[in-house]
């Protein structure tokens, strides 16, 4: 199928590349179908664009938390596990949405630690795991020893 996007223009998307978020993302519940886009090159991409297929003006930059030195251990509820079609742990990808903070005319980019994306890479179904309190087991692996 051909999809018109704000960032990439007209793009051909094969149906097996579509990632479905049945509940949408927080604040964007009407957009349920997405594709991942990344820069081509010999190295593994450091970030991805999660482009909505339902709204050509909607796209998010996402990153594997490991690239930022984080390691999530999330517990999924029975309902979340069912929505993700009971994936094996090796079939789950956890990603963080990046957002821009506006402070004193300086925009810094930061990951949303409280609402990671959890994607079943086999069935291509995902959800946004919103945590009311920050209680996941997160390991920071890239802290400088001089801190």
Image (cartoon, grey):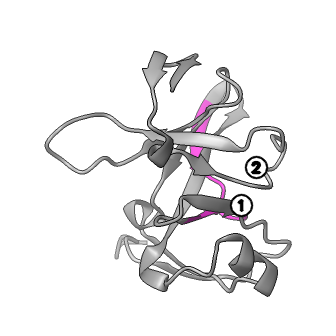
**Residue nearest the observer in this picture, 128 or 98:** 128
The secondary structure that dominates the magenta segment is strand
Label 1 or label 2, whichever comes before in sequence order: 2
- Magenta stretch: residue 109 in it? yes
**Residue 131 is one of the magenta-drawn residues:** no
Residue at point 34% right, 49% down? 46
Residue with the mark numbered 2:
25
Neighbour tally class for label 2: few under 14, some 14-19, many 20 plus, Cα within 10 Å: some
Residue identified by numbered label 1: 128
Q: Quadrant of residue 5?
A: top right
Tell which residue pokes out farthest to the top in this image.
Answer: 9
Q: Is residue 19 left or right of residue 141?
A: right
The secondary structure type at the circle numbered 1 is strand
In this view, the residue in front, 98 or 20, is: 20
Q: CA distance from mark 1 to mark 2?
A: 6 Å
Name the quarter where the C terminus is drawn: bottom left
Seen as rendered, the residue at the extreme left is 42
Q: Position of residue 28 (x, y in %)?
A: 80, 40
Residue 124 in percent (x, y) is at: 54, 58
Position of 95 relative to 52 (above/below): below
The location of residue 59, given as percent across then percent down, is 61, 32
Q: Quadrant of residue 146?
A: bottom left
Q: Quadrant of residue 76?
A: bottom right
The magenta span reads 107-119
Q: Position of residue 35 (x, y in %)?
A: 52, 40
Residue at image location 49% in from the left, 84% down from the top: 88
Label 1 close to label 2 by CB (< 8 Å): yes
Residue at 80 percent of width and 55 percent of height = 23
**3 relative to 19, above or below:** above
**Quick one: SS at disc 2?**
loop
* Above or below: residue 109 compared with residue 81: above
Please rate how many residues cluster around mark 1, counting C-alpha atoms within 10 Å: few if below 14, some from 14 to 19, many from 20: many
């Amino acid at each position: 199928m051909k999809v018109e996007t704000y960032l990439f223009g007209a793009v051909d998307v094969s149906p097996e590349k579509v990632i479905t978020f049945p509940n949408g993302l927080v604040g964007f519940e009407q957009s349920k179908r997405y594709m991942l886009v990344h820069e081509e090159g010999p190295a593994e991409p450091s970030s991805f664009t999660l482009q909505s297929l339902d709204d050509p003006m909607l796209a998010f930059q996402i990153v594997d938390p490991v690239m930022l030195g984080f390691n999530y251990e999330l517990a999924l509820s029975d309902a979340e596990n069912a929505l993700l079609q009971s994936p094996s742990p090796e079939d789950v990808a956890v990603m963080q949405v990046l957002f821009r903070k506006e402070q004193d005319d300086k925009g810094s980019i930061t990951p949303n630690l409280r609402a990671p994306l959890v994607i079943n890479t086999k069935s291509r179904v995902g959800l946004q795991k919103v945590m009311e309190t920050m209680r996941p087991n997160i390991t920071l692996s890239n802290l400088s020893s001089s801190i």
